[in-house]
Image: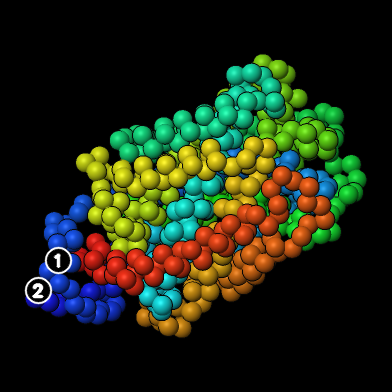
Amino acid sequence: MQEVDIPLTVHRVIADGGRRSSISSATFSATGSDLLDVETAEPAELERTLGLWSGMAIVIGTIIGSGIFSTPSLILTAVGSVGMSMVVWVLGAAVSVCACVAYMELGTMLPRSGGEKEYLQAAFPRPRALLPFVFCLSSLAVGSPSGLAADSAVTGTYFMYAATGRSVEHSEWAQRAIGVAVALFCTFMHGFFVRAAIRLQSVLTVVKVLLLVLIVAVGFGVGIKRGTRGFGDAFAGTSTHPSAYVSALFKVFFAYSGYTALNYSIDELRNPVRNLPRAALGGLLITATLYVLSNAAYFVVLDEAAVRDASTAVAGVFFTEAFGALWGQRVVPLLIGLATLGNVMCGMFSASRVLFEAAREGYLPWGRVLGSISRFQSPLVALVVSCTLTIVYIVTPPAGEAYAFLIDIGGYPLWLFYGLAVVGLLIMRRSHRDLVRPFRAWHVANGVTIATAVFMCVVPFVKPESDDGEIPYWAAPLAAVAFILLSCVLWYVQVVVRRGPERSHYAHK
């Protein structure tokens, strides 16, 4: 069969509002049978439906999820004292701001959906597509679905709390069944009612912000009336073992994660060079302030023992103590359940966009199907796959420690690729001097992000002071590393053997 030469253009997006321009080209040979796999008609592009405020709502909505309502008890247990728990929350906010600033430079320099996939591809071109491929598979199969599963499960916890009036002793499988229903609902909304889903996300974001404002206001009022309860001898019992702080930081960073949400869907953001920094940093700073004040409010109203015993329903116990049984055990838990549902909606939105871009880049088999846009202007197939993986993570972990395990297994690859993306940023300052940089991250922000990534990737393998849980301390990081190594093998099959990127949507634009 006759071979023809087809120009393979590697695209990058410059800071011009989303238009693509070529920076390099190569040539490869393809047979006629190869050409049959390429879709001849130009697929539709996703519309730019997000402005500054709706973009900020997605950032805030993605950040504010189950973390602030459920992890304070786990973090307190890990670090051992109220004072150190507060320090960890403030430290998490500072590190998150540093990482957000670095991603603002990356997003405005390469304003194209896909996040780390785009940044790693530009910074580490050899071996071809290895790091972006591994990132995509790790994010799609580990990071995103585990986080969405954790949020979905907590949504189930609070809906059960509202239904039964009890913060604990719920049916584990009833909570998981509600979590599955939440994932399916979010997929249905984003798949068939795109604009309505975005409006619903914005409404639920307002609910989440108002809940946090209410927590802060209640804590302030109670503090004035009767003083603090949980801040006596605040640092007594503080842990000195580094593994305790890794466990706590994974949960804090899980609570703060979401400030990069717009980097994954920037093709849908109007005027991204202007709106991305404002929406991302503004949303993070608002949320971080509310988080720190909310944690202080928890310890003003509840004593240390009550926070520990509350497990993942600490916000519900807080409102029960403040308002009594009706509001604290019925109404507010329902609102918190709706708030965490909103977080799942935002997370499903971002996760499906990463899968959509990976498919169009040729990193996944059946790329034309997974990277297709439905007549409802949504990546419907990508949404269905993201939902399916989320459901797998909801139903498979063992009972009891499932929530903490999901956070830990998702946090490991997250910080590995955060660190690599910022290292790539520093490399591109030398190798891609011609790229337009509307915003430059501070050197200290880059350094803090890289140092945190190294810490979060190394210390999880250090044995903690006590390891009496059902799931070994090394299980989550080892599982994450094993999948990353497996992804390298899959990269060889899909990219080197099958030449997926050479037959992708972007190769033929």
Q: Is residue 408 left or right of residue 394?
A: right
Image coordinates for residue 80, horizontal then vertical, percent: 82, 48
Q: Earlier in the sequence, mark 2 or mark 1?
A: 2
Residue at the image point whose x is 14% and y is 66% from the top? 33
Q: Is residue 472 visible?
A: yes
Q: Which residue position holds label 1?
A: 33
Image coordinates for residue 123, horizontal then vertical, percent: 43, 75
Q: Is residue 323 left or right of residue 435?
A: right
Residue at the image point whose x is 83% and y is 38% from the top? 304
In terms of depth relative to the viewer, which is nearer, 38 or 211? 38
Q: Which residue position holds label 2?
A: 1
Residue at the image point whose x is 59% and y is 35% from the top? 154
Residue 462 position (above or below residue 71): below
Res. 312 image quadrant: top right
**Label 2 residue SS:** loop
**Label 1 residue SS:** helix
Q: Amino acid at mark 1?
A: Ser
What number is the disc on residue 374? none
Q: Residues within 10 Å of mark 2 (few under 14, many from 20)?
A: few
Image coordinates for residue 6, horizontal then vertical, percent: 16, 75
Tell how many labels: 2
* Badge 2 vs badge 1, beta-carbon distance below 8 Å: yes
Residue 354 position (above or below residue 433): above
Q: Residue furthest top?
A: 326
Image coordinates for residue 107, horizontal then vertical, percent: 43, 63
Q: Residue furthest front?
A: 1
Alpha-carbon span between mark 2 and mark 1: 8 Å
Q: Amino acid at mark 2?
A: Met
